[in-house]
Amino acid sequence: MITFISSPKPFKGITKENQYRAVRSWLLAGKNVEVILYGDSEGIVEAGKDLGVKVVDEINCSPSGIPYFGSIVKHAEDNGKYDLQVYLNCDILLSGILQAISRIDLPQFLLIGQRIDLSEKVFIDLNQNDWIKQLTSIVIEGKAKLHLPTGIDYFAFRRGMWQSVPPIIIGRGGYDNVLLAYCMMNRIPIVDATYDVIALHQFHGYDHMPSGIKGVIDGADAMHNLSHAGSTRSRTMVSDARYIIKNNLLLYCPCRGDRLRCLELKLRYEMGSAKLWLMLRMIWRLLQAFGITGLKEPSLSDILKVSFEKDQVSKSTI
């Protein structure tokens, strides 16, 4: 029913534990689940055997050895079992993805959402019946927070959607912005599942990077990605989605109701009017500064309330 694809970091220390935990959460998504891990990171073959998932260690990579997104999705398009596919970072615990996708009646789409960042040494097992209660307690203790809509860690889509995607490098700055811009230019609807899909980002450091987090954000690979993202003045993000899924309902709510932002994106990606969208961007920023307009952010309490209510309904039908 669904194929998960990812390119993990080296399986060492806490990162190994995080990645094992993440993959196991994906395998809980439904009855027919396939997981394919890409790359030649340390321990990946052993992980594939331990977790019972496929490993593809030969994939087209950048000069720095990091796989290209296009190479991964092309392999999954040709060899994956299922039409529904999800590319995601290998430290993300995921719940509710299949239920959310089942609400989308569109020939093509990109499903994304904001993640929840867990603090260091905070662990949750989504296999436990009380995991929502656990997460609620962690939030109350201040050990989890909602990430900004600028960072995206999972992308769900139908097979064959990325035919002309630029040669972007996974896990480096700007690659998520390019994917959203690609959809906007090709008029592929973007769906925000922040309320209905719980994506938990497990804490990790950047010891696997010689230059640390700086190399991820503005290293050579990130600059390569940003060269395909266009202007950095207005990067695409989760809140730019055309639809929202909330309480199992697909709602038409472009840019979370921000009409100026909608017009800006239309001018930029559909009409290609650079001067007009930049002018509108300046107006939007000015109105933001005076508090007249701005992003409508969901709260963690709202997200957990939706998850709890859905969980109660699910248990009452068993």
Image (tube, helix red, strand yellow):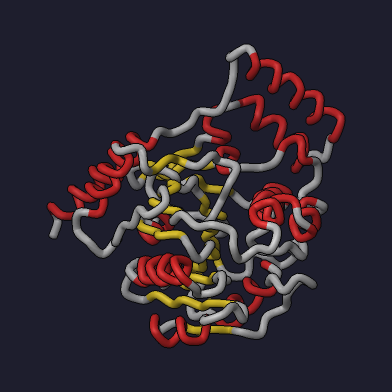
Picture residue at 51% right of the left edge, 78% below the top: 36
Q: Nearer the viewer, residue 132 or 34?
A: 132
From the viewer's perspective, tell me whether residue 125 is left or right of residue 58. Answer: left
Q: Residue 77: x and y, percent?
A: 60, 76
Q: Nearer the viewer, residue 79 or 236?
A: 236
Give the answer, above or below, for where 185 lies relative to 159: above
What residue sits 43% from the left and 46% below the top? 116
Q: Is residue 177 left or right of residue 2?
A: right
Q: What residue is at 36 percent from the left and 57 percent from the top? A: 95
Residue 270: give x, y in percent of width and height.
75, 42
* Residue at the right extreme of this rendering: 275
Q: Position of residue 130 (x, y in %)?
A: 20, 54
Q: Is residue 170 above or below residue 290?
A: below
Quadrant where the N terminus is found in the figure: bottom left
Q: Is residue 175 visible?
A: yes
Direction from residue 318 to residue 242 in the image, left or right: right
Q: Quadrant of residue 146?
A: top left
One can see residue 187 in this view: no
Residue 285 screen position, x and y as percent: 70, 22
| Apparent side of residue 145 relative to residue 233 in the rendered image (left or right) | left
Q: How many marks?
A: 0
The residue under the point 70% across, 69% down is: 68
User: In terms of depth relative to the viewer, which is nearer, 198 or 171?
Assistant: 171
Quarter of image, res 258: top right
Q: Quadrant of the C terminus?
A: bottom left
